[in-house]
């Protein structure tokens, strides 16, 4: 906003100076010099006044209060919170839980939990090309973590060369600090290089011996835990997670391979294959031994349970389970309940027989860590459900129902920040709908719409390359979102729009609209509508009538797909035949976002302009200006107002605007790195507030790096909700604004 006043001040000075020159002949140069000095003072005062007015405008005025709440993570602020995913887990007799995962945005790859709370982290797991891994274990002296050290061109410290990886076991002391050893590798000499070609898939300890499995190498290697030196190794076919008893007898998962089900096999301490095996599993993912010698197996196939086996007989016998049969798909499918598991990745048991189970959902949905008593009663759970995601509110329920790409929440805004949300449903079913696009893509921007009174979910991704559509049919599918349709853009290389084998039968060139004509959630060759268009997409929008809009970064860059009705299966109908093209308004040289409101015939567009061009091609930002157009459908292309938003002028993206969302009387934007929320009056385009995350979330946020990183919603009481991506610490922020 400040920049809008500067050209006016320059013009004022030039005109005033021109007037003075005409007023005073050259012989009065002394008077003119005095007047120039006065003119400079006047301009300085004006600049100071405008600057002070703008500084007042962009900070919250006295008496204005707002709340920053959140959804999706049990912990909303501070260093310790629930990590993005858990892929491996070890539980001590006193119930301390050690975890591991390949990636956590804030560096919490290896969290430590106890009594339903995060209590610590392993240090130095993030940055410098380091990643976590799939396994973790500990003994009385050390913690051992599977990890990956990527290559770096470092002349003075020990790193693999660029382009190479070390697949390691890293040793830590019980305080969570790296514990170096003689012969250790890495910058701090705490890493044991297990392989330079494939990663560690399992860790276990017995009798001061560390067992390390490597599935791709078909090998288990045993090391001395004090010296970290190899003792022996033996061949095992594709060993995944492992568990070792006090005698050194090893149980390991052999993973499912296509239609060939997985199984659990047994080896002696010296590597002799024993006769005991477990074959009544389909997709085993984790195993653990309890202190009575029973073996626990997470079954991530249709059962979605922990299976408990007595292994003291000649052949293992299943004697119990943890969790409801069929997991979250039992009863009302998708409905969250204490005993319903989904996407099981890890299991452990403490000395009292309590069982700890983690569910990650499917395609890395997020952490759901639960403790069960020996009788199977859930005692607590920790949730870290959000990773690269944002939320939107159901307009019919006044924002009480909130959806992310895979989850549904019930909100009570009268409660304190962070206590308002209840996790109600997981909306993805990979067993009934294995071609659900959420299993094959990485969506992150959520639109919730009511079309003819029924709820629909629309999802796009970080690069605006597609728009996915989901319907709901509670009578047959409970809370599950059923794949209903999909738009994709044209591939610039004259190749299929989506790389790989999915979706089946997709057109080989151009772009397409898929609609699930027979209602089975499967992509079939007769269900594609084909087209070819400009390949560079600026954004997507779904208006309140259900019409789809798309912007292309070109002169005729607006595409409008009017809703053609709802078919017999409940899918919205869109066609290229009914598509409408429109020219980009002349002020935009690079059109990005579009939001159209048919109730008022109001169009908001954003992009780069000739006056405020892009420094470089950053496809994820909204541009440099927003413009409002009234009476859009009647052909008006003269903006009611234009306003400049923060944009990059240096190439460093220190200041740029990631997302826009209009609702009611306001237009909201958010900046990329500073995550500041800008609030503009919809009637004038004037900036009135600039807000930051509040003390409820520690005043902090990660970057906003998705195109739809905010979503605004006006409730019936006049309060505004603004949902904002907070990928750094695994949640979605919820601003509650009484404006």
Image: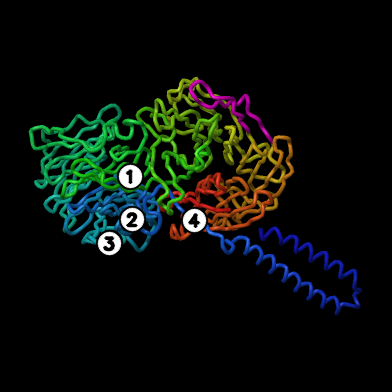
Q: Circle 4 — which element?
A: strand
- Horizontally, is 618 left or right of 101 in the view? right
| Distance of label 2 from label 4 (alpha carbons) | 33 Å
Residue 338 in picture, x, y percent from top left: 30, 40
Residue 569: say if magenta: yes
| Residue carrying label 3 | 177
For marks 2 and 1 on the same chain, the one whose residue lies earlier in the sequence: 2
Q: Circle 1 — which element?
A: strand
| Residue carrying label 4 | 67
Q: Circle 3 — which element?
A: loop
Residue 713 visible somewhere in the drawing: no
For marks 4 and 1 on the same chain, the one whose residue lies earlier in the sequence: 4
| Distance of label 1 from label 3 (alpha carbons) | 26 Å
Q: Are marks 2 and 3 in contact (CB under 8 Å)?
A: no
Which one is closest to the eye, mark 4 or mark 1? 4
| Residue carrying label 1 | 368
Which label belongs to residue 125?
2
Closer to us: 345 or 553: 345
- Horizontally, is 231 left or right of 70 in the view? left
| Distance of label 2 from label 3 (alpha carbons) | 10 Å
| Distance of label 3 from label 4 (alpha carbons) | 37 Å
For image coordinates 16% across by 40% down, the residue present is 295
Q: Are marks 2 and 4 in contact (CB under 8 Å)?
A: no
Residue 565 visible somewhere in the drawing: yes
- Horizontally, is 296 left or right of 300 in the view? left
For image coordinates 37% across by 32% down, the residue present is 429
Q: State the extent of the magenta-drawn residues as a range.
A: 560-582
């Amino acid at each position: 906003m400040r920049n809008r006043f500067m050209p006016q001040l320059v013009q004022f000075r030039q005109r005033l100076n021109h007037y003075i020159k005409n007023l005073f002949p050259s012989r009065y140069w002394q008077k003119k010099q005095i007047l120039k000095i006065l003119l400079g003072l006047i301009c300085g005062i004006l600049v100071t006044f405008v600057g002070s007015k703008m500084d007042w405008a962009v900070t919250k005025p006295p008496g204005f209060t707002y709340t920053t709440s959140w959804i999706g993570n049990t912990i909303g602020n501070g260093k310790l919170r629930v990590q993005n995913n858990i892929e491996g887990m070890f539980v001590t007799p006193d119930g301390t839980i050690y975890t591991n995962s390949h990636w956590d945005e804030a560096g919490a790859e290896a969290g430590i939990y106890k009594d339903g709370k995060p209590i610590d982290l392993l240090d130095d797991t993030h940055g410098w090309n380091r990643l976590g891994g799939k396994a973790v274990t500990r003994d009385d002296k050390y913690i051992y973590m599977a990890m990956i050290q990527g290559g770096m061109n470092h002349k003075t410290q020990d790193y693999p060369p660029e382009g190479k990886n070390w697949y390691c076991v890293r040793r830590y002391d019980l305080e969570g600090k790296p514990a170096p050893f003689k012969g250790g590798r890495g910058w701090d000499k705490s890493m044991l290089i297990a392989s330079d070609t494939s990663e560690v898939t399992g860790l276990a300890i017995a009798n001061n011996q560390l067992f390390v499995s490597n599935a791709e190498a078909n090998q288990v290697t045993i090391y001395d835990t004090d010296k970290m030196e190899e003792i022996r190794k033996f061949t095992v076919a594709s060993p995944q997670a492992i568990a070792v008893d006090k005698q050194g007898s090893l149980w390991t998962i052999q993973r499912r391979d296509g239609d060939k089900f997985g199984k659990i096999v047994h080896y002696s301490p010296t590597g002799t294959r024993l006769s005991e095996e477990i074959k009544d599993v389909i997709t085993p993912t984790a195993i653990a031994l309890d202190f009575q010698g029973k073996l626990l197996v997470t079954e991530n196939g249709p059962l979605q349970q922990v299976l408990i086996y007595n292994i003291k007989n000649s052949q293992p016998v299943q004697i119990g389970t943890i969790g409801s049969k069929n997991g979250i798909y039992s009863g009302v499918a998708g409905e969250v309940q204490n005993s319903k598991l989904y996407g099981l990745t890890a299991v452990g048991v403490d000395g009292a027989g309590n069982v700890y189970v983690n569910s990650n959902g499917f395609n890395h949905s997020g952490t759901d860590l639960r403790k069960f008593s020996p009788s199977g009663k859930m005692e607590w759970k920790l949730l870290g459900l959000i990773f690269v995601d944002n939320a939107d509110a159901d307009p019919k329920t006044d924002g009480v129902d909130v959806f992310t790409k895979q989850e549904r929440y019930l909100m009570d805004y009268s409660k304190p920040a962070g206590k308002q949300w209840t996790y109600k449903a997981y909306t993805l079913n990979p067993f009934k709908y294995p071609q659900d696009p959420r299993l094959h893509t990485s969506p992150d921007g959520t639109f919730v719409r009511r079309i003819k009174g029924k709820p629909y979910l629309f999802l796009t991704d970080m690069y605006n390359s597609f728009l996915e559509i989901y319907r709901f049919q509670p009578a047959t599918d409970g809370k599950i979102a059923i794949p209903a349709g999909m738009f994709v853009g044209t591939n610039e290389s004259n190749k299929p729009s989506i790389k790989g084998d999915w979706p089946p039968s997709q057109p080989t060139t151009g772009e397409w609209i898929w609609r699930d004509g027979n209602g089975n959630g499967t992509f079939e060759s007769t269900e594609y509508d084909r087209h070819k268009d400009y390949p560079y997409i600026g954004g997507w929008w779904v208006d309140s009538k259900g019409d789809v809009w798309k912007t292309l970064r070109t002169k005729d860059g607006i595409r409008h797909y009017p809703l053609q009705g709802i078919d017999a299966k409940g899918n919205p109908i869109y066609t290229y035949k009914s598509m409408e093209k429109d020219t980009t308004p002349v002020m935009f040289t690079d059109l990005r976002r579009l939001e159209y409101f048919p109730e008022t015939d109001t169009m908001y567009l954003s992009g780069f302009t000739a006056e405020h061009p892009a420094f470089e091609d950053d496809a994820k930002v909204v541009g440099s200006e927003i413009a409002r157009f009234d009476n859009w459908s009647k052909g008006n292309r003269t903006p009611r107002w234009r306003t400049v938003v923060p944009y990059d002028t240096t190439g460093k993206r220190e200041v740029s605007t990631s997302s826009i969302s209009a609702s009611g009387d306001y237009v909201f934007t958010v900046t990329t790195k500073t995550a500041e929320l800008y609030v503009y009056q919809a009637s004038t385009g004037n900036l009135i507030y600039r807000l930051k995350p509040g003390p409820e979330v520690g005043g902090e946020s990660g970057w906003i790096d998705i195109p739809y990183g905010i979503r605004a919603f006006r409730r019936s009481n006049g309060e505004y909700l603004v949902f904002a991506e907070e990928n750094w610490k695994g949640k979605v922020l919820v601003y509650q604004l009484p404006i």
